[in-house]
Amino acid sequence: MKNLILFTAFSMISTLNACTSTKNETSFAYISNQGDHTVSVIDNAESKVIKTVKVGKGPVGVAVSRALNRAFITNVEGQSISVIDTNTNTVIETIGIKGSPVGIAITPNSKTLYVADWFSDRILAIDTNNYQNRHEVIVAKAPAGLIVSSDSKTLYVAARDSNDIAVIDTSTFSVTKRIPTGKHPFGLTLSADDKMLLSVNVYDNTISITNTDSFKLETIKVGEHPYCVALNANNQTIYVTNTQDDTVSVIDLASKKIMATIDVGMTPEGVSFDALNNQVLVASWGQNQVSVIDAKTNQILSSIKTGDKSRAFGQFILVK
């Protein structure tokens, strides 16, 4: 009986700790502002900027790591990556890149950082334990969006001027396949089970949905000049930013139909889903703000003033 009581008490404490840990989680958005060379750090629960961080020249891409407590920002004009300590929200290191880094992604195991060098047509792989340990591969003209599979074994690269996606085996760092898309693919995302690869085709006004097992492709028409794409937490809803009609297309994945078109700030670019607060954040380059969308109602909850020319290209939401 004593052992049972102790076991029950221990179980209750463990459950309480687990609940407390979840309850205490907070999500933050790291928004790159290309025009004033800063990153706006947003507390998503409060919908407000809590800090503005000075980074390199022309920040564009964002990748975050909970395990490392880091946000990595590509500076396309500064030819560098700013490394932000997300505990203090200060730049602790600058990684030099001889080229024009734009897209960026980190592996789910946080061991490798992948960077798309826009003008040199290459992808860099950088060891997060030693930034000088690097490899590179030439993929195609103008590599843009990047996304890594959940097992960290496959990297997908949107090759904008080749109108396809390069599939890279991360163990050999070599291109194993090319997936045709529409014209000028840019933003990418993957479903949580890695079965669906979504790519935004800027010049076609479409998104492509590719089955990563069969490589069967489906196409959905969206708004004018789409740029980036995000999925909600249960992989049922797609969000696409349309830069030239200042909207977000909301798509039901099962039916492949547009459920809503939401007016947001001018020239929306980066988009991410905040699962902790069930909302969608959209960075608007032309209005220097982030629009917050209620994922349940598809209504705008708030608009948050950020820096000049907000882009937030990549996976920019960090849960701590």
Image (spheres, grey):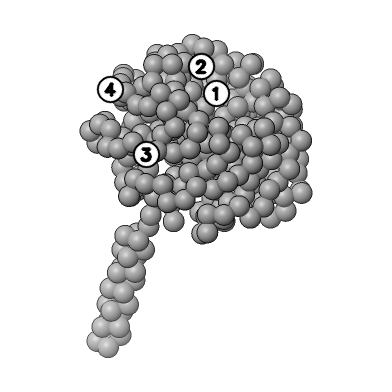
Looking at this view, name the residue that lies furthest to the bottom: 2
Verify CB contact (< 8 Å) between mark 3 and mark 1: no
Q: Residues within 10 Å of mark 1 (few under 14, many from 20)?
A: many
Which residue is the site of mark 3? Answer: 304
Observer-side mark, 4 or 3, equals: 3
Q: Going 34% across and 69% down the picture, which residue do you hit?
A: 17
Name which of mark 3 and mark 2 comes first in the sequence: 2
- Residues at marks 4 and 2, CA–CA distance in whole angstroms: 20 Å
Which residue is the site of mark 1? Answer: 186
Observer-side mark, 3 or 1, equals: 3
Q: Secondary structure at mark 1?
A: strand
* Place of residue 243 in the rendered image (x, y in percent of width and height, measured from the top left): 44, 20
- Residues at marks 4 and 3, CA–CA distance in whole angstroms: 22 Å
Which label is found at residue 202? 2
The image quarter in which residue 114 lies: top right
Q: Is residue 71 left or right of residue 171?
A: left
Q: Residues within 10 Å of mark 4 (few under 14, many from 20)?
A: some
Q: Is residue 168 visible?
A: no
Q: Going 69% across and 22% down the picture, which residue do you hit?
A: 140
Quadrant of the frame with the C terminus: bottom left
Q: Residues within 10 Å of mark 2 (few under 14, many from 20)?
A: many
* Place of residue 284 in the rendered image (x, y in percent of width and height, measured from the top left): 43, 29
Q: Is residue 312 left or right of residue 105?
A: left
What amino acid does circle 2 point to?
A: Val
Verify CB contact (< 8 Å) between mark 1 and mark 2: yes
Q: Going 72% across and 29% down the picture, which residue do you hit?
A: 122
- Residues at marks 3 and 1, CA–CA distance in whole angstroms: 25 Å
